[in-house]
Amino acid sequence: MFRGRFEHSIDGKGRVSIPAKFRETLKREYGSDELIVTIFDSCLVAYPFAEWQIFEEKMKDFSQLKKEAKSFLRYFYSGAMECAIDDHGRILIPPQFRDHANLNKEIVFLGVMNRFEIWNKDVWEKEFATYKETFDEISEGIAERMGL
């Protein structure tokens, strides 16, 4: 599982180092450093290839005749691309992805269980402040659903 928050810089060519902890998780839990990266909310999301395959299997059950399913699949899948981690532990983020997530210099990696997200640092800090304000309310609702 991917856990934690790590700050990194992205260079002018769009290369960024994947946090060492995340690279270790990829090797240890997935035996591979293959990633699928796509756009999601105001950030990018990166799935280990094995997790992406599980996700794809679940998506096959979506009714492709329903408008919201078609919209989701088009949006989410049209942005998906394979990203190889190079010998220096970096991935290359294409310009259209950098534009979508406003990735310019300082970025934040967030571990989110079976995937990780890549955020513009300033955008993440604003999102985090919002989450912080509503965390108690949200956590109570989740605890109720989980029977905790």
Image (cartoon, grey):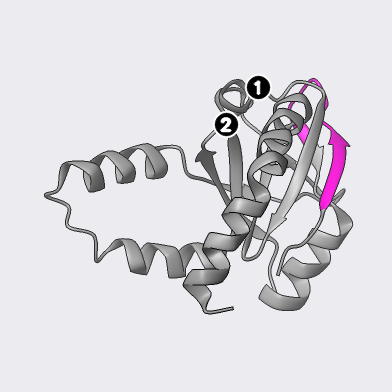
Amino acid, disc 1: Asn
**Visible in this render: residue 137?**
yes
Position of the N terminus by quadrant: bottom right
Q: Nearer the viewer, mark 1 or mark 2?
A: 2
Q: Earlier in the sequence, mark 1 or mark 2?
A: 2
| Residue that numbered label 2 is attached to | 42
State the residue in front, 58 or 42.
42
Q: Position of residue 127 (x, y in %)?
A: 67, 34
Whether residue 86 appears in magenta in the rendering, the answer is no
State the residue in front, 132 or 62.
132
| Residue that numbered label 1 is attached to | 102
Amino acid, disc 2: Ser
Give SS at disc 2. loop
How far apart in space, not on screen, are marks 1 and 2 (Cα)? 8 Å
Q: Position of residue 47 (x, y in %)?
A: 58, 57
State the residue in front, 96 or 41.
41
Q: Position of residue 44 (x, y in %)?
A: 60, 39
Instruction: Bin the neighbour count of mark 2 within 10 Å (Cα to Cα): few under 14, some 14-19, many 20 and up.
Output: some
Q: Residue at x 52, y 36 (%)?
A: 41
**Visible in this render: residue 50?**
no
Q: Is residue 107 above or below residue 113?
A: above
Q: Residue at x 73, y 67 (%)?
A: 26
80 vs 131, left or right, is: left
122 vs 100, left or right, is: right
Q: Which mark, residue 92?
A: none
Give SS at disc 1. loop
Q: Position of residue 25 (x, y in %)?
A: 77, 69
What is the span of residues highlighted in magenta in the rendered image? Answer: 5-15
Q: Is residue 113 above or below residue 42?
A: below
Q: Is residue 87 above or below residue 145?
A: above
Q: Residue at x 81, y 56 (%)?
A: 4
